Structures are given as structure tokens and as C-alpha cells.
Image (tube, rainbow, N blue to C red):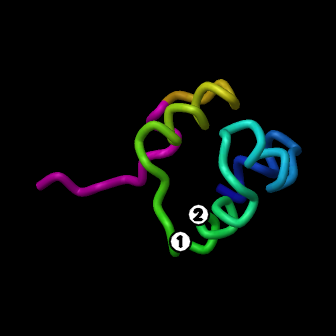
């Protein structure tokens, strides 16, 4: 998430406003103590014109 904030040149506060969550929630996402719900990930993708795959970690499906 830090990469996205840097890439889009937005603060965590602005990011929170764009996706409709509190600033503290973005901090929890960045720390890894909270995982966004799917609806929030959809808002992230829409707000920053990124594909959903951008927000999904590589998972070994074997």
C-alpha cells in the first residue's frame, strides 16, 4: 500500500477519503494489522485506476 500512496502521490488521509474509510484504518492496512474487505479493495481499484490484481498478493495455488 505504501507503494500505491507514493506512486499516486497522495497522503494516507487523502487515500482514506477516496476509499471512504478513516485515516486510522489506512494505517492498520499499512501495518498489516487489518485486511480490507473486498468492497474496499474495489473502491481502491476504482479510485486509483488499478486492476484488482494490483491489490492481490501472489499466492501459490499448488
The image shows residue 47, relative to residue 2, as above or below, that is: above
Quarter of the figure with the C terminus = bottom left
Q: How many marks?
A: 2
The image quadrant that residue 60 belongs to is bottom left
The residue furthest left is: 62
- Percent across and percent down for residue 10 are 86, 46
Q: Where does the magenta region start and end? A: 52-62
Residue 22 in which image quadrant: bottom right
Residue drawn at x 60%, y 29% is 50
**Residue depicted at 64% across the width and 62% down the height:** 25
Q: Which residue is mark 1?
A: 32
Residue 11 part of the magenta-drawn span: no
Number of the label disc, if any, that sits on residue 51: none
Left or right, 36 with reference to 23: left
In whole angstroms, how far apart are the C-alphas of marks 1 and 2?
A: 5 Å
Kind of element beneath mark 1: loop
Q: Nearer the viewer, residue 35 or 51?
A: 35
6 vs 38, nearest the viewer: 38
Position of 11 compared to 53: left or right? right
Which residue occupies 77% across, 42% down? 17
Amino acid at each position: 500500500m505504501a507503494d500505491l500512496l507514493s506512486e499516486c502521490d497522495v497522503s494516507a488521509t487523502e487515500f482514506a477519503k477516496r476509499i471512504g474509510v478513516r485515516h486510522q484504518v489506512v494505517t492498520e492496512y499499512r501495518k498489516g494489522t487489518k485486511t480490507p474487505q473486498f468492497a474496499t479493495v474495489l473502491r481502491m481499484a476504482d479510485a486509483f485506476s488499478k486492476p484488482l490484481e494490483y491489490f492481490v498478493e501472489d499466492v501459490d495455488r499448488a
